[in-house]
Image (cartoon, grey):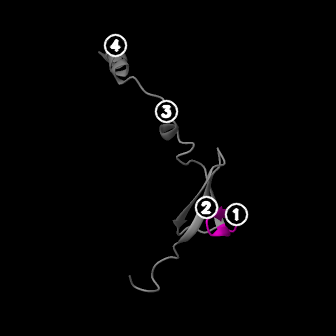
Amino acid sequence: MKPGIHPDYHPVVFQDAATGKQFLTRSTATSQRAVEWADANGTQTYPLIVVDVSSDSHPYWTGSARHIDSAGQVEKFRRRYG
């Protein structure tokens, strides 16, 4: 990699706004907010990024997604415009 052209890639804590669940990962995102995170190396301070949706609250991953009956939709279309 060329030096000086890549953004800083550092540990960041993301928090789901709906559930409050937090997870530590690496990102180039920055934030003025910070949070204490305890791990095997002790307690560290990391930037905190609050996100609206994560896998903890997304309907697809939580199993609460609506399943659309596509066959019923086709029959409804044919009745209406057939």
- Left or right: residue 45 compared with residue 6: right
Rate crowding at label 4 as few (under 14), some (14 to 19) or many (20 or more) other CA atoms within 10 Å: few
Going by the numbered disc 3, the residue's amino acid type is: Ala
Disc number lying in front (4 or 2): 2
Q: Decide: marks 2, 1 in contact (CB < 8 A)? A: yes
CA separation in Å, label 2 and label 3: 27 Å
| Element class at badge 3 | loop
Which of the two labelled residues, at mark 2 and mark 1, occupies the earlier sequence position?
Answer: 2
> Residue at coordinates 31% horizontally, 16% vertically from top-left?
78
Q: Which residue is mark 4?
A: 79
Q: Would you say the residues marked 2 and 3 are in contact, meaning their CB atoms lie under 8 Å apart?
A: no
Which is in the foreground here, disc 2 or disc 3? 2
**Dot in front, 3 or 1:** 1
Instruction: Give x and y (percent) for residue 14.
Output: 60, 58
Mark 4 or mark 1, earlier in chain? 1
Q: Compute the Cα span from label 2 to label 1.
A: 8 Å
Going from N to C along the chain, the mark reached first, 2 or 3, is 2
Q: Nearer the viewer, residue 6 or 35?
A: 35
Question: Is residue 41 in the magenta section?
Answer: yes
Residue position marked by numbered label 3 in the rendering: 65
Q: Which range of residues does the magenta coloring cover?
A: 32-46
Seen in the picture, residue 70 relative to 65 is either above or below; the reply is above
Q: Where 67 sits versus 80, above or below?
A: below
Q: Quadrant of the C terminus?
A: top left
